[in-house]
């Protein structure tokens, strides 16, 4: 297993366990050797050019403003409530913007293009992941080359827009499924914490039934196994939106290069 995959699995586990990260790594916020910060030596000068508009050495400090702000923390705002169900290390981006992947003609040229059955069939073929990206790029290049020169740019641009719309819709469905997957993992992690605490309480009770203790142990082992298997699978599931992004970029590049 590469160091990257180990790091990825650790980060995913931390996302699932939420507040338990502090229990796993309690010393992350402290210095490694526990030493206090050193004092700045007297006469120390920060290297580099002086700051712009810096006062001359020995100059008096500017006068303080006559009026202090009414609320010095007025700039602070409560951050928006974010979802905690996204379990992937990749940043969540809602949609792929055309400006990110398209360097062809103005997209407005596609507004008056009538979508034909041949165009819709081509979109169906190239967005399907059963075809490799190289095969899909070859198909769109060949289709663009066959277009009449007078209609080529507008029709090719319309083709790109339709492909991107389909890939964005597919990617949105995949991301929604990943969030549901992450929510289930989060709930399972909470259940594991509760089962672990209950198992510890049972073992400490002198009147606890050995049968009950064994049932609690087996339930904890089984749920832990399910959690670990799902966590390992999630590493690959999170790559699907990235693959869709790569397909959109590759097809857009292929269409633009064929013009």
Image (spheres, rainbow, N blue to C red):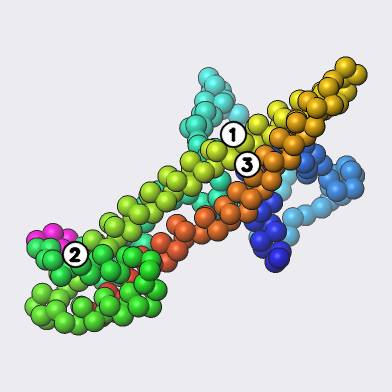
Label of residue 187 in the image = 1
Answer whether residue 21 is visible to the viewer in this image. Answer: no
In reply to whether residue 109 is colored magenta, the answer given is yes
Secondary element under disc 1, as helix, strand or loop, is helix
Q: Quick check: marks 1 and 2 in contact, CB under 8 Å?
A: no
User: Residue 167 placed where, x, y %?
Assistant: 33, 59
Q: Quick check: marks 1 and 3 in contact, CB under 8 Å?
A: no
Which residues lie in the magenta part? 108-113
Which quadrant: the N terminus?
A: bottom right
Which quadrant: the C terminus?
A: bottom left
Label of residue 16 in the image = 3
Q: Residues within 10 Å of mark 1 (few under 14, many from 20)?
A: few
Q: Residue at x 64, y 44 (%)?
A: 227
Earlier in the chain: of badge 1 and badge 3, it is: 3
Residue picked out by circle 2: 120
The image quarter in which residue 50 lies: bottom right
- Indicate whether 240 appears above or below 42: below
Viewer-side residue, 214 vs 118: 214
User: Residue 93 placed where, x, y %?
Assistant: 44, 50
Image position of 70 (left or right of 217) = left
Earlier in the chain: of badge 1 and badge 2, it is: 2
Answer whether residue 235 is visible to the viewer in this image. Answer: yes
- Indicate whether 44 appears above or below 62: below
Earlier in the chain: of badge 3 and badge 2, it is: 3
Q: How far, Cα to Cα, is label 3 from label 2?
A: 41 Å
Secondary element under disc 3, as helix, strand or loop, is helix
In reply to whether residue 147 is colored magenta, the answer given is no
């Amino acid at each position: 297993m590469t160091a990257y995959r180990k790091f990825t699995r650790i980060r995913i586990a931390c996302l699932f366990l939420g507040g338990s990260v502090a229990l796993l790594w309690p010393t992350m916020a402290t210095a490694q050797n526990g030493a206090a910060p050193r004092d700045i030596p007297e006469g120390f000068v920060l290297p580099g050019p002086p700051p712009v508009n810096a006062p001359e050495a020995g100059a008096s400090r500017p006068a303080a403003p006559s009026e202090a702000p009414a609320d010095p923390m007025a700039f602070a705002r409560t951050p928006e409530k974010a979802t905690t169900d996204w379990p992937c290390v990749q940043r969540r981006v809602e949609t792929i913007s055309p400006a990110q992947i398209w360097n062809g003609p103005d997209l407005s040229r596609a507004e008056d293009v009538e979508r034909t059955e041949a165009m819709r069939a081509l979109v169906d073929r190239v967005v399907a992941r059963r075809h490799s990206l190289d095969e899909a790029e070859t198909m769109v290049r060949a289709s663009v080359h066959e277009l009449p020169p007078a209609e080529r740019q507008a029709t090719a641009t319309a083709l790109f827009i339709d492909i991107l719309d389909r890939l964005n819709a597919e990617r949105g469905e995949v991301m929604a499924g990943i969030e549901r997957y992450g929510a289930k993992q989060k709930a399972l992690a909470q259940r594991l914490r509760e089962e672990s605490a209950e198992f510890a309480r049972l073992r400490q009770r002198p009147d606890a039934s050995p049968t009950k203790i064994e049932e609690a142990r087996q339930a904890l082992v089984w749920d832990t196994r399910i959690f670990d298997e799902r966590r390992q699978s999630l590493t690959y599931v999170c790559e699907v939106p990235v693959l869709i992004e790569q397909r959109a970029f590759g097809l857009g590049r292929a269409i633009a290069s064929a013009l």
